[in-house]
Amino acid sequence: MRTLAQTLGLVFKRIQFTPDLMPSDITGTDIIEEDPATGHRTWTFVQGPIFGNILLADEINRTPPKTQSALLEAMQELACTVRGNNYKLPAPFFVLATQNPSSWKERTHCPKRSSTAFCSTRCSTTSRPMKSCRWWTSRLSPPSRTPTR
């Protein structure tokens, strides 16, 4: 993935999902900065790793649902919300995410509704003794909002 991003001139980011990962760890957060000359304090947004063109999200089902939800929002809306402010993600935006098999100890259940809305499943054989591995990919553009008849 890193080589693909470099070849295409895109920004590659990787997130290792863990049980203690919070949504702000992936989206970014606001910090208070003080101007040394005036002493005036302002909020400044510091982007998280989700602000890359190609994102490798490793072991997504090890993290709590609220952090999974932050990633799913980014994949669906091509934006993220931090402290009520909406920040657009760079285009193109592509996510490749892995998920541990259900027999893994530190696994958080990914809701079926979320996984079917955002992912495609492919079986993969690896050198590790896993039964299967799920790869999630995001849409490259927002879904159509036109009603179907």
Image: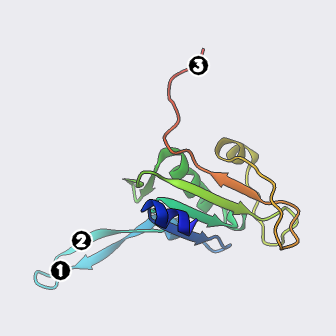
Q: Name the residue under label 3.
A: 148
In the image, farthest residue toward the front: 7
Question: Please, which colouring scheme is shown?
Answer: rainbow
Q: How far is the residue under mark 3 from the one under mark 1?
A: 53 Å
Q: First in sequence: mark 1 or mark 2?
A: 1
Q: In this view, does 144 lie above or below 109?
A: above
Q: First in sequence: mark 3 or mark 1?
A: 1
Name the residue rendered at 58%, 52% in the picture.
Answer: 72
| Amino acid carrying mark 1 in the image | Asp
| Amino acid carrying mark 2 in the image | Thr
Name the residue rendered at 42%, 54% in the picture.
Answer: 89
Residue 108 placed where, x, y %? 75, 63
Q: What element does badge 1 sit on? A: loop
128 and 143: which is toward the camera? 128
Which mark, by number, is residue 35?
A: 1
Q: What element does badge 2 sit on? A: strand
Assess whether mark 2 and mark 1 are in contact (beta carbons under 8 angstroms): yes
- Label 3 or label 1, whichever lies nearer to me, is 3
Q: Mark 2 points at which residue?
A: 42
Q: How far is the residue under mark 2 from the one under mark 3?
A: 46 Å
Residue 41 placed where, x, y %? 22, 75
Residue 110 placed where, x, y %? 73, 55
Instruction: Say which quarter of the image contains residue 31.
Output: bottom left
